[in-house]
Amino acid sequence: MALNPQLFPNGMPVPFLNELFVLSRDGVEFEIDKIPGAGKIRTRGTIYLSNIRMVFVAKKPEDFIAFDMPLLFIHDEKFNQPVFHCNNISGHVDPVVPDNENRALYSTHSFKILFKEGGCGTFVPLFFNLIASVRRSQQQSTAEPRVDPLQAAQTPVDEMMRHAYVDPNDPTKIYLQQPNSESELRRRSYQSQPA
């Protein structure tokens, strides 16, 4: 989890090196707890899903502009189909802890993504496939238990996209081509860049 990641002027997240955006989904309501200075927040906006992370960008920024969740740090994710409410994905995400900070000072966040406008038949399978792929990559690596999400991001996005079913009632936008990449705008990691 990283609060307020870098965004382009149009609101799209600035990609990491080797990051591929798979889709974006408007019309979602995002709920997250333990935001510093704000507590629990529930707001509407857009979710961006890549081979590395999921980024929520608020439509009307109040307490935060965006929230970044590395796929490697998400756990206990679950797709819910309640009888009287909209479909949603809930789960937990561990924070991205800066190198010079104590892990004990940061707690795990609970999140929920509510699909308020249209179906979720495109988003849900791609989300769960990417999570599974990142976990397989982490298990195959011989690195320490908490590896950099960028190193575990070698997911078969192209293969998933070739086999994706697109629901006509689902407002999800699938990216067949990545945004123009200008090297000075790409970030290398979750750590802040030196000035």
Image (cartoon, rainbow, N blue to C red):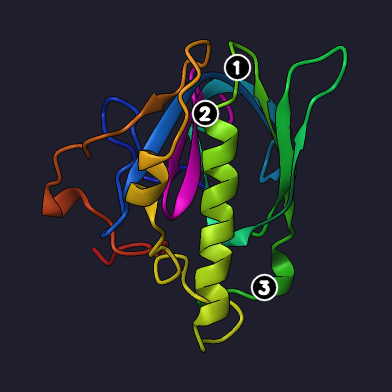
117 horizontally vs 23: left or right: right
Q: Please say if the residues under marks 1 and 3 sit with CB atoms less than 8 Å apart.
A: no
Residue 94 placement (x, y as % from top left): 66, 59
Q: Please say if the residues under marks 1 and 2 sit with CB atoms less than 8 Å apart.
A: yes
Dot in front, 1 or 3: 1
Q: Determine which of the numbered discs, if any, sits on residue 122 in the image.
A: 2
Residue 108 placement (x, y as % from top left): 73, 57
Q: Amino acid at mark 2?
A: Thr
State the residue at coordinates (52%, 21%).
45
Decide which of 99, 53 is in the foreground and name it.
53
Label 3 SS: helix
**Is residue 110 in sight in this rendering?**
no
Q: Which residue is mark 3?
A: 103
Mark 1 surroundings within 10 Å by alpha-carbon count, few (fewer than 14), some (14 through 19), many (20 or more): some
Q: Compared with residue 16, is residue 10 higher up or lower down, i.e. above or below? A: above
| Boundaries of the magenta span | 46-63
85 horizontally vs 163: left or right: right
Decide which of 33, 92 is in the foreground and name it.
92
Q: Amino acid at mark 1?
A: Gly
Q: Which residue is mark 1?
A: 119
Q: Compared with residue 33, is residue 9 higher up or lower down, i.e. above or below? A: above
Q: Main secondary structure of the magenta part?
A: strand
Q: Amino acid at mark 3?
A: Arg
177 horizontally vs 83: left or right: left
- Label 1 to label 2, Cα distance in Å? 8 Å
